[in-house]
Image (cartoon, rainbow, N blue to C red):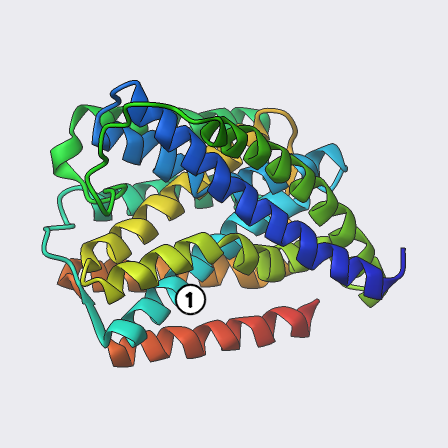
Amino acid sequence: MSISTALIVFAASLFALVKGADYLIQGAEKIGRYFGMPSFVIGALIVGIGTSLPEVASSFAAIFAGETDIVVSNAIGSNIANILLVAGLAAVVGRKIVSTKDLVDIEVPLLVISSALFLGTVYDGVVTTIEAAILFLGFLVYLSYLLLHPDDSVVVEVSEKPKKVDQLKPLDFLHLIGGGVGLVMGAKYLIDSVIIIAAGFGIPTGVVAISAIAVGTSLPEIIVSVTAVLKGKTDLAFGNVFGSNVFNILMMVGLVGLFENLTVDNATYTIGLPVFAAVTLIFTISAMSKRIYIWEGLMFLIFYLFFMIQLFSVA
């Protein structure tokens, strides 16, 4: 496969990956409503986990292809993109985003603790299966808390209260099955094309993962957050970033790492990790003030551009 063909396959498979997750969420949400699942459970299990499915699927495809450095790079790149691109764009579009809820009691500690735990597992350049088990255990504790204390958090709050579904249609099952197929096939061909693109341009696969894959798989979060801001639901923009980032580092890395030791490439280790720590700290400070102004959003976007330049300069 030529590089030009690989680029086309990359774009097509990324689209299939993201849309597959979207259709899978739609089908699962309808079925969940039909069986009377509470709105918060739908938010936590279906919407919360569902928006991380592109990252999870592409990460499993990566370890099956022997590219274990893609997983951590994908997680770090997605979290950086969620803060700098998602929150940055939301703040610019809405001129500012404001949280009406106190984030210091629950959201901020969850993000800080999970990020610190993640940094502790990758500092030596490898995430072992034991370390992955610790991360995944942290995710289970986090998820249990969300389910037991639904009123304490905005992390996976749904934008609309789900209506009861009285009858399931064949289209609902088609969304569920077709979305799953699109997710799996999109993930496989995405990783195949990344390997070819990286080899063709002489850059590590981890660099492609932390940049192109991370941005592509963060598209659902960008769409959800910008749409929420335009509708005046700025709490969702904050909660979306918190929820997605915690899910990425605890669930994605933890779950995938149970099957294979995960490595960290040089560019991700020297550039990605420090930027991840820095932007998490910056976002934490912004969250404590419960608002991000337009000028901060613009700085986030400029910072992301600077991050991309630095990343490819060391690749």
In this rendering, position of residue 71 left or right of residue 188: left
Does residue 287 sit above or below 140 in this rendering?
Answer: below
For image coordinates 70% across by 48% down, the residue present is 190
For image coordinates 48% across by 32% down, the residue present is 171
In this rendering, position of residue 268 left or right of residue 220: right
The residue beneath circle 1 is: 85
For image coordinates 18% across by 63% down, the residue present is 232
225 or 259: nearer the viewer: 225
Is residue 146 at all visible to an observer of this figure?
no
- Residue 118 position in % (x across, y down): 44, 42
- Residue 137 position in % (x across, y down): 40, 24
In this rendering, position of residue 192 left or right of residue 244: right
**Which residue type does callout 1 highlight?**
Leu
Q: Mark 1 Cα within 10 Å, few/some/many (few <14, many 20+)?
A: many
Does residue 28 sit above or below 215 in this rendering?
Answer: above
183 or 53: nearer the viewer: 183
For image coordinates 66% across by 60% down, the residue present is 207
- Residue 7 position in % (x across, y down): 76, 62
Q: How many labels does the image show?
A: 1
In this rendering, position of residue 221 left or right of residue 290: right
Specify the quadrant of the image occupied by residue 89: bottom left
Is residue 220 at all visible to an observer of this figure?
yes
Q: Residue placed farthest to the right in the image?
A: 1
- Residue 173 position in % (x across, y down): 49, 26
Q: Quadrant of the N terminus?
A: bottom right
Q: In which quarter of the image is the C terminus?
A: bottom right
315 or 20: nearer the viewer: 20
Specify the quadrant of the image occupied by residue 142: top left
266 or 165: nearer the viewer: 165
Q: Is mark 1 on a helix, strand or loop?
A: helix
